[in-house]
Image (spheres, rainbow, N blue to C red):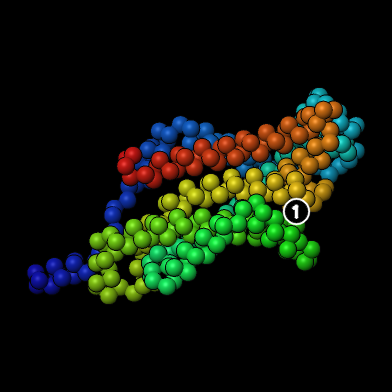
Amino acid sequence: MAESINTTDARQPVAPRREGPGRAWRRFARHKPALVGAAVILVYLLAALLADFLAPYDPLDMGAGSRLTGPDAAHWFGTDEYGRDVLSRVIYGARIAFVVGVLSASGAAVVGMLIGVLGGYFGGLLDRGVTMLIDLIFAFPTILLAIAVAAFLTGGGLPPAVPVIIALCVVQAPHFARVARGATIAIKAQPFVEAAQVLGGSHPRIIRSHIAPNVVAPLLVQFALSFSYAILAESSLSFLGVGHPPPAPSWGAMLTGAYGYMERAPWAAFFPGMAITLLILGFNILGDGLRDFFDPTRR
């Protein structure tokens, strides 16, 4: 009977134990800059969700005020070259930024994780193919590749945001694939994974139960960084005329419209530019905090 019990226990390879949510939160809360970044992101997220209630004017209304009026009590951020309220457009621009950021980073994370985990786990020819694909995409300048993909998809009857989202997925997926591949190779060599393989565990089950849960942590850090890049890239594409077309309240499109009025109405470019800067800064700080949080050497 004793031998039977010992044999049963030996056939249950167990991954390293994870700390509870309460302790994890206390450890994360000690990283004050990360909390500041999370608070900034939360403010932007609430603005995006409640834009219909927070915006004082319709972002497309050209009769909201006089053209290029400076900040005053009626228009806190002033008006643009068409008399539209800049504050309302900045608030609605947060909605566009989050939609593009969430969808593009999520799509890139799913594709990159799938490719990276499969390549790192099975190795051999598949891994070499994944590595070559990653190196091939990295060989192109990121913004030029995004412009090429977005321009190729624009005009095919797709909504304006779809070409930008697909383009950002293409340029960001290799980053997730590289992170997932490296983490998979490291986890694959752990004793609990080797034990599961020796005891006859199927490849899908090992990937699902042992590889994927341990790969998620570094991918969360990459997700925060990719989200901030997606916002910056979307603004850049809109500024170059490949992203959301006018009169969409995209921050990049707002900068494009204000470019010719920098000396006369600097507020039309300052406020959307600051909106981009603060949100990207918030995600970068949060990404640094997540990196420290998931680093086992700092525990």
Q: Which residue lies furthest to the front in this view?
A: 139
Label 1 CA crowd tier, 10 Å (few <14, some 14–19, many 20+)? many
Q: Where residue 122 sits: x, y (%)?
A: 38, 70
Q: Where residue 37 sits: x, y (%)?
A: 53, 36
Query: Residue beneath label 1, please?
Result: 242
Q: Where residue 86 sits: x, y (%)?
A: 79, 35
Residue at horizontal 53%, vertical 46%? 225
The relative height of residue 53 versus residue 201 in the rendered view (above or below) is above
Q: Which residue lies furthest to the top in this view?
A: 72
Instruction: Find residue 185 and report its image quarter.
Output: bottom left
Task: Answer left or right for 192 relative to 180.
Answer: left
Question: In front: 146, or 13?
Answer: 146
Q: Name the element at disc 1.
A: loop
Task: Answer left or right for 51 relative to 1.
Answer: right
Task: Answer left or right for 67 relative to 103.
Answer: right
Residue at horizontal 73%, vertical 31%? 270
Residue at horizontal 27%, vertical 75%? 200
Question: Looking at numbered disc 1 in the image, what kind of residue is underneath it?
Answer: Val
